[in-house]
Amino acid sequence: MGALCTAHFAQSSRLITEHGGYEIKTIGDSVMGAFRTVDNALDYACALHRDPGGATLPGAAQLQIRAGIHIGPVSVEKGRCVRPDRELRRARDRGDHRIGNLGQRTGQGRH
């Protein structure tokens, strides 16, 4: 399975670059990337689904690709992907009084 993961990560990295993205990090058997447009992100996910890498390796037939695409402003801070709307919502939910009405309106109803 190690060779399959290596082949998959190599394919993912290649496709991220090919679709104008930036690889942020790997998490277990997952990859987190950022793209300038939703179209680029979707094109990457579809390309990876069509060819996840390592097709001739043992276990390749069981490989399943899932993708989640989040829309909205993103920044990378200390190697961590940060979505300001999510951070505002978390602070609001913790009862952080520094958020005020603006943060409550910005984060309300967005998932």
Image (cartoon, rainbow, N blue to C red):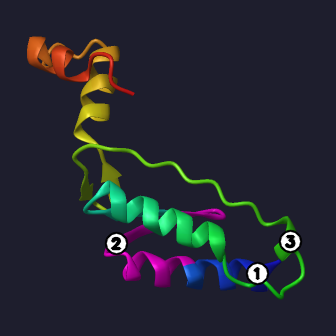
Q: Is residue 27 magenta?
A: yes
Q: Residues within 10 Å of mark 1 (few under 14, many from 20)?
A: some
Marking on residue 50: none
Q: Amino acid at mark 1?
A: Leu
Q: Residues within 10 Å of mark 2 (few under 14, many from 20)?
A: some
Specify the segment rendered in magenta: 12-31
Position of residue 7 measured from the top left corner of the image (x, y, whole percent):
67, 85
Report the residue at 23% width, 17% height from top: 96
Marking on residue 61: 3
Choose between 7 and 95: the one closer to the eye.
7
Choose between 78 and 25: the one closer to the eye.
25
Which image quadrant: the C terminus?
top left
State the residue position of label 1.
4
State the residue position of label 2.
22
The image quarter in which residue 10 lies: bottom right
Secondary structure under the numbered disc 1 in the rendered image: helix
